[in-house]
Image: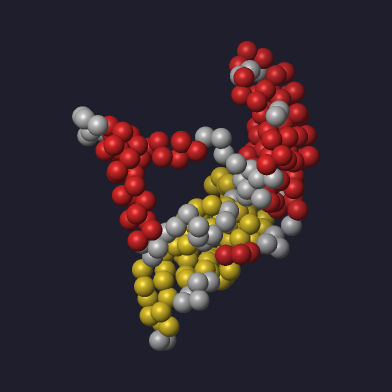
Amino acid sequence: MDQHIECWLLLVDILGLLGCGATRAVAYMDVLEELIRRHHELYVRLYPKTVKPKLHHMLHLPDQYRAMGKILSCFVTERKHRSLKRAALYVFRHLEHTSLADLLTQQCEQIIEGHSLFQREFLVHPTTVVVCGMSLTRSNIAVLECGNIHARDIIYVKGGQLARITGFWRSESGVITAHCTGCDHVEGYKYRDSDAVLFVQSQTIIDAVAYRKLAGGEFRVVLPFLARFD
């Protein structure tokens, strides 16, 4: 069982590295090459009857990313797959025109609401709150450079701190701050929630943390790939 676990953890590292960002991840192409090699050797040994052509394609990814200088997705059409299915569900004529118009309308509505593909960070469906004469916006969901972060998610903060999201605040100047409760380290990769209240600037959030609940209020975490370089 140890080798099966090792194989899947190598895949976790590969996905974690690719999730570091289109520009930042390029610095780790040598690491990606080694991870893919080790994963493939172990996978072929453990699951010889399930080898797919995509495994061979993965061997070429590091060289392609080095050449482009960016980590780019090869499956961009999948991003709108569900939206297209929703649009096509009640269309009986002119499928292409109707679904395209529907997707374009959705995109325009997002831009009107202040969401843009060119924004690095923003709150999702924020509400406005006036505190001591200052106008702030609040939301339970934020789109950050590391991806979508929701309330109750656990995040890894620069410096090694783990915290659980309560909500997000955005000031008039555009600074996004996460309202969190701290997580206390128990042992190894085990943590538990604490009563400490933290306010974390979005730029210091490295990534969300995968975790599994344990008995007694504890949880075991899988730290993000960039945690090893922090």
Q: Quadrant of the C terminus?
A: bottom right
Q: Which residue is at a point 75% across and 45% down the rendered structure image?
A: 28
Q: Which residue is at a point 74% across and 51% down the rendered structure image?
A: 228
Residue 1 in the image: above or below residue 148: above
Q: Which residue is at a point 47% across and 71% down the rendered structure image?
A: 170
**Quarter of the image where one finds residue 7:** top right
Q: Position of residue 135 (x, y in %)?
A: 41, 79
Side of 153 relative to 80 (left or right):
right
Side of 99 relative to 1 (left or right):
left
Q: Which residue is at a point 75% across and 23% down the rendered structure image?
A: 41
Looking at the image, which is closer to me, 68 or 1?
68
Q: Position of residue 193 (x, y in %)?
A: 56, 60
Q: Quadrant of the N terminus?
A: top right
Residue 36 in the image: above or below residue 108: above
**Quarter of the image where one finds residue 82:** top left
Residue extending farthest top: 49
Residue 9 visible from this viewpoint: no
Looking at the image, which is closer to me, 21 or 176?
21
Looking at the image, which is closer to me, 189 or 216?
189
Q: How is the protein colored in the picture?
A: secondary structure
The mark total stands at 0
Q: Position of residue 111 (x, y in %)?
A: 38, 58
Q: Position of residue 39 (x, y in %)?
A: 71, 29
Residue 63 visible from this viewpoint: yes
